[in-house]
Image (cartoon, rainbow, N blue to C red):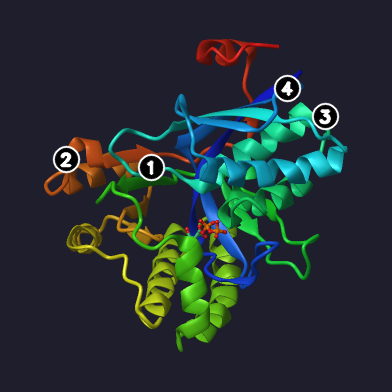
Amino acid sequence: MRQAAVRAHTNIALIKYWGKRDEEYFLPMNSSLSLTLNELYTDTCVTFDETLEADLFYLNGKQQSEQETVKISRFLDLFRKEANLSVRARVESINHVPTAAGLASSASAFAALAGAANLATGLQLDDQTLSMFARQGSGSATRSIYGGFVEWNKGTSPTDSYAIPVDDADWDIGMVIVAVNRSAKKVSSRVGMKQTVETSPFYPSWVETAETDLQAIKEAIKERDFQTMGEIAEHSAMKMHGSMLGANPPIMYFEPNSIQAIQCVNRLREQGVLCYVTMDAGPNVKVLCRLSQAKQIKEELSKYFNEEQLLVTGPGEGIRELTKEEVTAYGWKRS
Ligand code: DP6
């Protein structure tokens, strides 16, 4: 029996990944850049156990359906193949996402699973290879291997599309997350991006400008030019949503409360507070800001949203193995 447990934080893209050029290997149409977040993470324990006849998957203590377990099994197969193993595994995951936030993320889920499977199989893959393995669970997981600002280079083939750390983001960077709606997404990112690629006349310009934006934001990060970084990030998010609106049928993730949050951010900016919005494949709004001003921004947003809907976070770290104490506290200690 071989067991390992790993923590991975989620990330929010500032230059979005939207569209695959290869669905089997999760190769993206464009490179992307994200910020790893401290307050949102997944802890996952993988136990390879000779007595098991099938893989088992528990999320937040609850055994998951066959449909969910199959996704985990396929992902573990990548590691089993590499390690020449056939033994089945028990996978136990705890999502640390504040209740009611509706922010569970495939990024932290697959990065944590990749990290734990790597240790439990004894493969000892380096972070770069691990990032490529995580990619094949979910594209955004490619970036969650690392902390701070992270770039995912689209690469040219399945073996050179991986993430690299860009900057530790340790210069007064934060995010206020506005959980507008906690119900499940209407259109998953997987389906939404495919539909956009196939039908939106705006999609080619999305891909073209994403590359220019990526270079520009990397320069801004290097210069620690927060304003330019925020402006590029907000523009990138809106261009992505613009490309979705051009899909047929159109994809729209905005809800009335998303607009309310965006308008609140615009007002704050008029008052001289530097803050910028970004949105993903759902109605939640994420406000990129100075961590030192996050409290003030949260206060303004709390005129429209309740305490449970607002979360302040700073930059998070890359994946790490959980300590013995942490594993014991979850009750996972079995081998
Ligand atoms: C809008 O990584 O969830 O959040 O690769 O199909 O699993 P799959 O998609 P996923 O897509 C993320 C899309 C996004 C932008 C981003 O995180 O870059």
- Is residue 205 visible to us here? yes
Of callouts 4 and 2, the N-terminal one: 4
Return the residue at label 1: 291
Q: Residues within 10 Å of mark 2 (few under 14, many from 20)?
A: few
Q: Amino acid at mark 1?
A: Leu
**Residue 49 has which mark?**
4
Q: Amino acid at mark 3?
A: Gly
Q: Residue 70 location in percent, x, y?
A: 60, 44
For the C terminus, which image quadrant?
Answer: top right
**Residue 306 has which mark?**
2
Residue found at x 35% / y 73%: 251
Q: Residue 126 location in percent, x, y?
A: 80, 41
Q: CA distance from mark 3 to mark 2?
A: 46 Å
Which of labels 3 and 2 is toward the front?
A: 3
Q: CA distance from mark 4 to mark 1?
A: 44 Å
Return the residue at label 3: 122
Residue found at x 51% / y 85%: 205
Q: Residue 102 location in percent, x, y?
A: 34, 44
Which of labels 4 and 1 is toward the front?
A: 4
Q: CA distance from mark 2 to mark 1?
A: 20 Å
Question: Are circles 2 and 1 on residues that touch, CB within 8 Å?
Answer: no
